[in-house]
Image (cartoon, grey):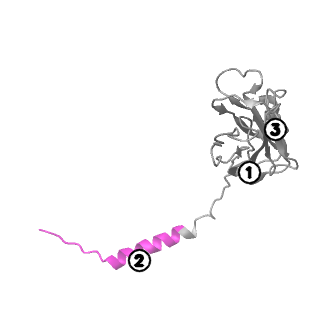
Amino acid sequence: MIQHRTVGLAATTLALAASLAATSASAQDPARGNVGLDAQVGRVCMLGEPNPAGLALGQISEASGARVGRLAAIPAQTIQLPGTFCNYGGAALAISASPLAVTSGVAQTGFTGAVNYTCSISAWGATAATVRTSATNAAGDGARSTSAAPKATDLTLVVSDFATAADDLLQPGAYLALVTITLGPDAGLNASGS
């Protein structure tokens, strides 16, 4: 013999609802706890990418006239460093530079293989960071500039005042120089020699 049992869905739902109501009436208030979040941001300085990346001065000696063979007038040159920042105060900007020097050979009497120049950046601190290359500044270090507060700005490096020591004739060949811009903690610049 087969038995069938039919259970009404409505009756089961009502029984389940009554059971839940009885359980929630006896439930306690919700428990709460606090979870702390801890994070840190390090001190960061970032120099913008130089634009242009370098300066191509081309022929730097006069090709004719009374000054033929001597240094031609070279106008001031600029390099942009957009998006430069330090997220803390007391960061210093320093510039070091080597003379624009011939890459081969030794200069003969009456000729020179070195051209000096000045580099400056004025938008960082109260005073400009500057350096002047010369035979007496072999390290190529100059005056640095410190910003007392965190700062974000576009910097402009100005390279100007090109000159030889005694207005001698220039030795032929390729001339190269290196300008280094350092941005960071003032004490760090002292330690690195900038």
Which residue occupies the extreme right position in the image? Answer: 126
Amino acid bearing label 1: Leu
Q: Residues within 10 Å of mark 1 (few under 14, many from 20)?
A: many
Asked whether the beta carbons under mark 1 and mark 3 sit within 8 Å of each other, the answer is: no
Residue 21 in magenta? yes
Q: Is 3 above or below relative to 156?
A: below
Query: Which portion, as a residue range, is magenta?
Result: 1-23
Is any atom of residue 86 visible in this view? Answer: no
Mark in the foreground, 1 or 2: 1
Q: Position of residue 99 (x, y in %)?
A: 74, 32
- Cα separation between marks 1 and 3: 16 Å
Amino acid bearing label 2: Leu
* Residue occupying image coordinates x 64% and y 59%: 31
Badge 3 or badge 2: first in the primary sequence: 2
Mark number, residue 14: 2
Badge 1 or badge 2: first in the primary sequence: 2
Q: Position of residue 168 (x, y in %)?
A: 78, 30
- What secondary structure is marked by label 3? strand
In this figure, which residue is indicated by the disc labeled 3? 131
In this figure, which residue is indicated by the disc labeled 1? 155
